[in-house]
Image (cartoon, rainbow, N blue to C red):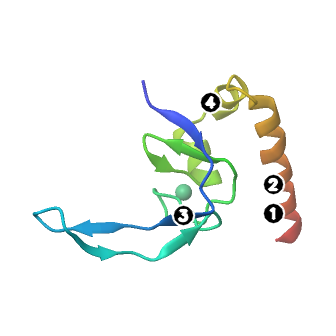
């Protein structure tokens, strides 16, 4: 069974941390905000909040439909699922209106 969940990005997060072989921090990436989420499959901007995550990959609208074709049923049975679907609909409508 694949893994599908919804993710609320924190206000700020570190993009990456590189450790050396002794687990010492070698490099810390820039800070990302909750607006900075890209699709792990195609690199498109992910505009839906909460972010759909499939097998550890944040998905954009297109990839969500491609890789999780039954996403509507799966989200609707989650806690607050109906509310989340309504929010997604509003977010899509707002985006389409601005394009
Ligand atoms: Zn994508």
Left/right of residue 22 with respect to residue 49 in the rendered view: left
The crowd level at tag 1 (other Cα within 10 Å; few <14, some 14-19, many 20+) is few
- The correct choice, above or below, for 5 with respect to 34 in the image is above
Looking at this view, name the residue that lies furthest to the left. 21
Where does label 3 land, which residue?
38
Is disc 1 in contact with disc 3, using a CB cutoff of under 8 Å?
no
Identify the secondary structure beneath mark 4. Answer: loop
Q: CA distance from mark 1 to mark 4?
A: 23 Å
Q: Residue at the spot x=46%, y=57% of the render?
A: 40
Q: Residue at the spot x=69%, y=22% of the render?
A: 77
Is disc 1 in contact with disc 2, using a CB cutoff of under 8 Å?
yes
Where does label 2 land, which residue?
91
N-terminal label among 1 and 4: 4
N-terminal label among 1 and 3: 3
Identify the secondary structure beneath mark 1. Answer: helix
Q: Residue at the spot x=53%, y=44% of the render?
A: 53
Identify the secondary structure beneath mark 2. Answer: helix
- The correct choice, above or below, for 55 with respect to 15 in the image is above
């Amino acid at each position: 069974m694949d893994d599908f969940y919804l993710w609320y990005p924190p206000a700020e997060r570190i993009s990456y941390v590189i450790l050396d072989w002794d687990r010492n921090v070698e490099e810390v990436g820039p800070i990302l905000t909750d607006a900075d989420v890209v699709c792990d499959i195609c690199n498109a901007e992910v505009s839906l909040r909460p972010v759909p995550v499939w097998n550890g990959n944040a998905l954009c609208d297109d990839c969500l439909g491609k890789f999780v074709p039954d996403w509507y049923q799966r989200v609707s049975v989650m806690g607050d699922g109906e509310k989340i679907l309504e929010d997604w609909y509003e977010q899509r409508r707002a985006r389409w209106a601005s394009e």
